[in-house]
Amino acid sequence: MSKRKQDAGESVINKNPNTDDESGEDEDFDVLNVDFEWFDPQPEIDYHGIKALLQQLFDVDAQLFELSALTDLILSQPTLGSTVKVDGNQTDPYAFLSVVNLQEHKDKPFMGKVIQYIQSKARSNPGLAPLAELLSQSTIPAIGLVLTERLINVPSEIVPPMYTMLLEEIDWALQDKEPYNFSHYLILSKTYTEVASKLDAEDSRPKKKNKAVGSSFETMYFHPEDEVLQRHAICHGGFDYSIKQDEGHSDSKRVFQELGIKPQGHAILISADQFKAAVQNVAEYLKPQA
């Protein structure tokens, strides 16, 4: 049975944003109006779609994990979390959100790898020291690992309903005495920095004015809601992926002509008593514009 359906309204995606501001001509672009629907995760339909989104979330480090087992765990909780689709329930999800109890599943080998990975990344960043300390305890607290990802062009307005429904579903699960009484929520996500192109550095032609090679670039967010969530965090911070890419990899992910991008992992730890307020602020920040 599907989750109660919600209408996201007309989400407008600019298909051709390149315009000539000096031409004086009217903007020429196409728009695509899409109605999104929310459903419960369903094992017989969503396995491949959720697994692909997990691969996108973990980026190059995805090969370090047993994503098939992790996907099965997510799908074993059909009343917890959401998928977002466009063309009906039988299609692949464009986005998903779920939460996994690290304490409850710590003894599963595939979850042990995830926990060890997060612990090592937390130790690599002093800003994530509180997270490293929690995961180093003899008994891991009841941390809810929030896993969420969406296709690159899916608008961020689909996010608040997923988080709001998650809070409701956790409340219902607790009434049924299910193991979702979390002490903390840990959101895994991704950021990126723009990096100077290696191709440009090798080019002997005069360069356009830009930041010098080796200068620091601002951290950018794939998920804009992360900037709101981390305002409520005990700690948050980024980390490098374990699997290294060759020097040309950033050029293959250029966002502008002059710059490539370097993705990084990102973790946000929020205490349970702050999570509801964080979700409410995300909903306010991402509410559709009138």
Image (spheres, rainbow, N blue to C red):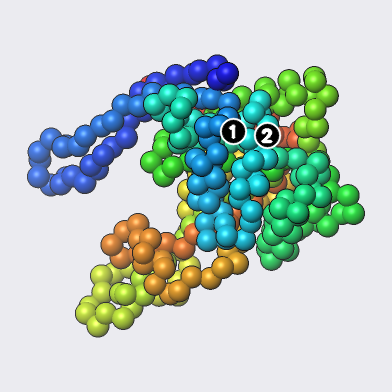
Residue in view at x 30 percent, y 74 percent: 200
Most distant residue in the right direction:
138
Q: Which residue is mark 1?
A: 43
Q: Residue 216, position in %: x, y?
A: 48, 67
Most distant residue in the front direction:
44
Amino acid at circle 1? Pro
Q: Which mark is residue 76?
A: 2
Q: Residue 51, position in %: x, y?
A: 54, 45
Q: Secondary structure at mark 2?
A: loop
Answer whether residue 187 is visible to the viewer in this image: no
Residue in view at x 56 percent, y 68 percent: 243
Answer whether residue 246 is visible to the viewer in this image: yes
Who comes first in sequence, dot 1 or dot 2? 1
Question: Left or right: 196 with respect to 187?
Answer: left
Question: Left or right: 154 with respect to 223?
Answer: left
Amino acid at circle 2? Ser
Q: Secondary structure at mark 1?
A: helix
Residue in view at x 52 percent, y 32 percent: 45
Of residue 13 and residue 27, the one placed in the foreground of this image is: 13
The answer to which image quadrant residue 215 occupies is bottom left
Disc 2 packing (10 Å; few <14; some 14–19; many ≥20): few
Dividing the image into 4 quarters, which one contains the N terminus?
A: top right
Dividing the image into 4 quarters, which one contains the C terminus?
A: top left
Most distant residue in the bottom direction:
204
Q: Which mark is residue 156?
A: none
Q: Are marks 1 and 2 in contact (CB under 8 Å)?
A: yes
Question: Left or right: 263 with respect to 10?
Answer: right
Residue in view at x 50 percent, y 18 percent: 5
Q: Residue 17, position in %: x, y?
A: 24, 43
